[in-house]
Amino acid sequence: MNFRFRDLWSPTGTVDRGTYVIVGVLGFVIKHNLDRFIAYRFQHTWGLFSYWEPLRNAGRITALSRPEETFLAALVATALPFIWIGVVMTLKRLRSAGISTGYVFLFFVPFLNLLFFLVLALIPATGAAGVAVKLRQRPSWLQRMAPNSAAGSAAFSLLITVPLGLAIMAFGSVVLQRYGWGLFIALPFTMGFGAAFLHSIRQPRSLASCISVAALSTAFLGLGILGLAFEGIICLLMAVPLALPIAIFGGMVGYVVQKHRWTEANPAFLCALLLFSPGIQWVEHVIAPKPETFVVRSAIEINAPPEKVWKQVIAFSEIGPPQEWMFRAGIAYPVRAEIMGSGVGAERHCVFSTGAFVEPIRVWDEPHLLKFSVTSNPPPMQEWTPYAHIDPPHLHGFLISNGGQFLLTPLPGGRTRLEGTTWYHHGLWPSEYWRLWSDQIIHRIHMRVLTHIRDEAEKG
């Protein structure tokens, strides 16, 4: 082993596997103990799994306190030289093994990088370049299986990616019960990339062809999810605007890869790619980020004084069948409200099409403010499905109302401004995308109730 200290910083040249392992192990030992020291100074604990969870809420930088920001900045600053050394050594090792240096991006992929390091530690350097060339020249078993025609290779790619996508989806939603970045971002990208990768594994394909097979893989995945009763039609339609563009982007990336190095495609790369989504799902499961609380406010003006409106607020009569498309499609909607008792401590039940919200009264300021918490939430929807009944995990605990209030403000001429407010959270990520749906649903629920209260108060 002829290796000098300055070789740690220069990306040129090669390195053998022994040197790669020694530098990697020593670097990890030094870095881990340095992180432990920094964590101790900031009164944090630090272990091996802390690299996937440096801070529980680090995913939202704006939510960090000042000490946590300083702690995170210290970790990042001390990590930079180690990252550079790791990238340099990985480039050298890839070059000595005769493998394309483009695979260095795997250094940054959580979980996959552990497998990547192991492979680089095992591949011998002596004569490795010649062996790699021969291996690349000999078709892999996937290349031998793939049809040569465009239609045949597209069908071949779907036969592989769709079942694997269903398995990954079931792992995340059924086993881990996580509906986050791994499911809605990483999985569509993996599906699109994998479909284009397999479609072009035999020979290069056009960009339009790669995009088409990427979109088809996601479409067939949705049909499989529906057919296996994992989800209903409504949730799948809500996910389409998010998942389909990401799958198409994955197909475009797959096209770029096959355009420049399509002869180097191999099953090992595809297997590594398929671990991407489950790895992110597992990280989300371990970290279990705390959902953010959102608020929705809706208001209406009523031609009646607050005293009359108040009587309808605390308990309103049966509302007629819904006309809104989302409620007719299965989203839970309010039917009536009942009150047991009077004043603080009374219990209000807002009955929905799927059950009742139990709402203990916290503030009873008649006829100005009724404020309540929510101790029981019914399912947020009844899924459209070919089956008699399905019960996906997201119907339980993923869209939760924390509380609400009705604020009555007197207006000139004996009129009233009635404002309804709901505080809620959901366990879906990317949270801002799903908030677009949940805010709109809750606003429509508000307006259904407020409109009914207005009609009844004005009649009364």
Image (spheres, rainbow, N blue to C red):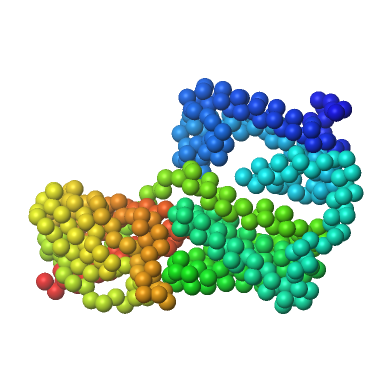
Quadrant of the image for the C terminus? bottom left
Q: How many callouts does the rendering have?
A: 0
Name the residue located 72 percent from the left edge and 54 percent from the top edge: 268
- The picture quadrant where one finds residue 392 is bottom left
Q: Judge left or right: residue 89 versus residue 366.
A: right
Quadrant of the image for the N terminus? top right
* 314 versus 383 height, above or below: above
In this orientation, which residue lies closer to the viewer: 250 or 309? 250
Name the residue located 78 percent from the left edge and 67 percent from the top edge: 144
Q: Judge left or right: residue 166 versus residue 209.
A: left
- The picture quadrant where one finds residue 117 is top right
In this orientation, which residue lies closer to the viewer: 100 or 227? 227
Whether residue 304 is visible here, answered yes or no, is yes
Name the residue located 15 percent from the left edge and 63 percent from the top edge: 338
Residue 208: x percent and y percent? 71, 72
Name the residue located 83 percent from the left edge and 36 percent from the top edge: 16
Residue 311: x percent and y percent? 12, 62
In this orientation, which residue lies closer to the viewer: 199 or 342? 199
